[in-house]
């Protein structure tokens, strides 16, 4: 199982963005140190009331700060007190790199998911962490 360290600045930004009445999200940046994923920064993009997408036209949000790598994605679910991934989320995540994690932010806390290959032809989404909100 993975362990996560989330920088205070990331906590603060996620708490601010979770108060918006529409989905927002972006990319998680940081470092991997063995089984520890250190989330140190994030990028930001506005979405719609119930949906946010990341495409190749979003090059700006995919640029990691110096010394960091892309760890995965994050987005808010402003309509959920307790966040869970939607079928749209899991379908999109299955298209991403297997090493990425994905954070869904609700009103009460965040959940981080990872995509695991269970068989060569399919991928399974697993919850790996619950982050209590500050």
Image (tube, helix red, strand yellow):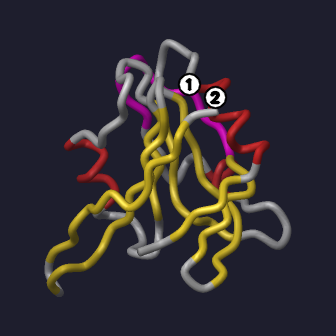
- Residue 31 is situated, as x and y percent measured from the top left of the image, at 69, 72
Farthest right residue in view: 66
Farthest top residue in view: 21
Q: Classify mark 1: residues with Cα within 10 Å, few (<14), some (14-19) or many (20+).
A: many
Q: Nearer the viewer, residue 91 or 102?
A: 102
- Residue 121 is situated, as x and y percent measured from the top left of the image, at 14, 81
Q: What's drawn in magenta, residue-wise?
A: 43-52
Q: How many marks?
A: 2
Q: Residue at x 66, y 49 (%)?
A: 61
Q: Classify mark 2: residues with Cα within 10 Å, few (<14), some (14-19) or many (20+).
A: many
Q: Main secondary structure of the magenta part?
A: loop
Q: Residue at x 64, y 77 (%)?
A: 32
Q: Residue at x 81, y 61 (%)?
A: 65
Query: As drawn, is 116 to the left or to the right of 107?
Result: left
Query: As drawn, is 15 to the left or to the right of 92?
Result: right
Residue 87 in the image: above or below residue 24: below
- Residue 13 is situated, as x and y percent measured from the top left of the image, at 71, 34
Task: Tell whether label 2 touches label 1 (CB within 8 Å).
Answer: yes
Q: Which quadrant of the structure image shows residue 115?
A: bottom left
Q: What residue does disc 1 label?
A: 18
- Residue 97 is situated, as x and y percent measured from the top left of the image, at 42, 72
Quarter containing the N terminus: bottom left
Q: Residue at x 26, y 62 (%)?
A: 125
Circle on res. 59: none
Q: Secondary structure at mark 2?
A: helix
Circle on res. 15: 2
Whether the magenta-drawn stretch holds residue 36 is answered as no
Q: CA distance from mark 1 to mark 2?
A: 5 Å
Q: Which quadrant of the structure image shows residue 98?
A: bottom left
Q: Nearer the viewer, residue 131 or 112?
A: 131
Whether the magenta-drawn stretch holds residue 47 is answered as yes
């Amino acid at each position: 199982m993975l362990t996560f360290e989330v920088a205070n600045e990331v906590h603060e930004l996620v708490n601010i963005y979770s108060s918006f009445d529409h989905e927002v999200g972006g990319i998680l940046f940081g470092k991997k140190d063995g089984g520890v994923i250190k989330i140190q920064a994030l990028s930001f993009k506005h979405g719609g009331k119930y949906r946010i997408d990341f495409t190749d036209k979003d090059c700006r949000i995919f640029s990691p700060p110096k010394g960091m790598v892309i760890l995965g994605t994050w987005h808010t679910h402003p309509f959920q007190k307790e966040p869970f991934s939607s079928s749209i989320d899991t379908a999109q995540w299955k298209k991403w790199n297997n090493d990425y994690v994905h954070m869904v932010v609700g009103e009460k806390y965040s959940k981080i998911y990872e995509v695991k290959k269970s068989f060569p032809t399919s991928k399974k989404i697993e919850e790996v962490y619950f982050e209590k909100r500050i």
